[in-house]
Image (cartoon, rainbow, N blue to C red):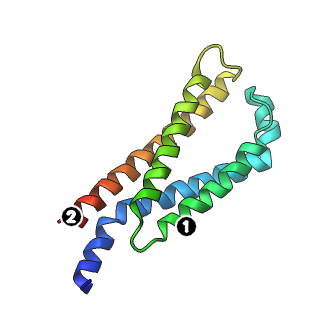
Amino acid sequence: MSESNQQSAQNSQRLLRLALRGNAAFSTVCGIILIAFGDSLGTQIGSGPLGPLGWSLLPFAGLVAWISMGKPIRKWPAIVVVALDVLWVAGSIPLLFPSSPLTGTGKILALLAADAVLVFAVLQAMGIYRSSRSSRA
């Protein structure tokens, strides 16, 4: 691959790389917060302990960061990240129902987290699309 083609491929993956790295950073920060404050936060928002959720976010964040370091980023692992993000958002929807045990604050926090995850999913999907389009050109 010529240097100009290599540069073009890297530019086409810029959005995907940034979205994956943002997702990894957000997941890491959320994971650390949930590990550090999960018990008290869980009690305050009506969910129970959140530490295990925090611990599960850290390997996910590591995997997403690792995927973002690919040169080029492989399409299928990025698609799996988008799918997992969509599943997170879908799993958050029942938390917003009136029958949910979450307090009002808990519902707001769940909604904000789901919104952020959805933004990452959309940006990653756009990055995959752009990257795929430029590799066909």
Amino acid on which disc 2 is placed: Arg
Which residue was labeled with disc 1? Answer: 66
Disc 2 residue crowd, few under 14, some 14–19, many 20+, Cα 10 Å? few
Q: Quadrant of residue 6?
A: bottom left
* Residue 71 percent location from the top left of the image: 41, 74
Looking at the rendered structure, which numbered label has been put on residue 41? none
Does the image show residue 7?
yes
Q: Looking at the figure, which quarter contains the C terminus? A: bottom left
Looking at the rendered structure, which numbered label has been put on residue 136? 2
* Residue 93 percent location from the top left of the image: 54, 26
- Left or right of 22 on screen, residue 125: left
Q: Looking at the figure, which quarter contains the N terminus? A: bottom left
Q: How many marks?
A: 2
State the residue at coordinates (77%, 34%): 42
* Residue 119 percent location from the top left of the image: 44, 44
- Left or right of 46 on screen, residue 27: left
Disc 1 residue crowd, few under 14, some 14–19, many 20+, Cα 10 Å? some
Q: Are marks 2 and 1 in contact (CB under 8 Å)?
A: no
Q: Is residue 62 above or below residue 3?
A: above
Q: Is residue 70 above or below residue 104?
A: below
Task: Tell me how far mark 2 sits from mark 1, CA to CA.
Answer: 25 Å
For the residue pair 58 and 26, the one nearer the viewer reads as 58
Amino acid on which disc 1 is placed: Trp
For the residue pair 111 and 58, the one nearer the viewer reads as 58
For the residue pair 68 and 28, the one nearer the viewer reads as 68
State the residue at coordinates (62%, 25%): 95
Comparing labels 2 and 1, the label whose residue is closer to the camera: 2
- Left or right of 123 on screen, residue 38: right
Direction left: furthest residue: 137
State the residue at coordinates (44%, 46%): 121
State the residue at coordinates (30%, 70%): 11
* Residue 57 percent location from the top left of the image: 66, 50
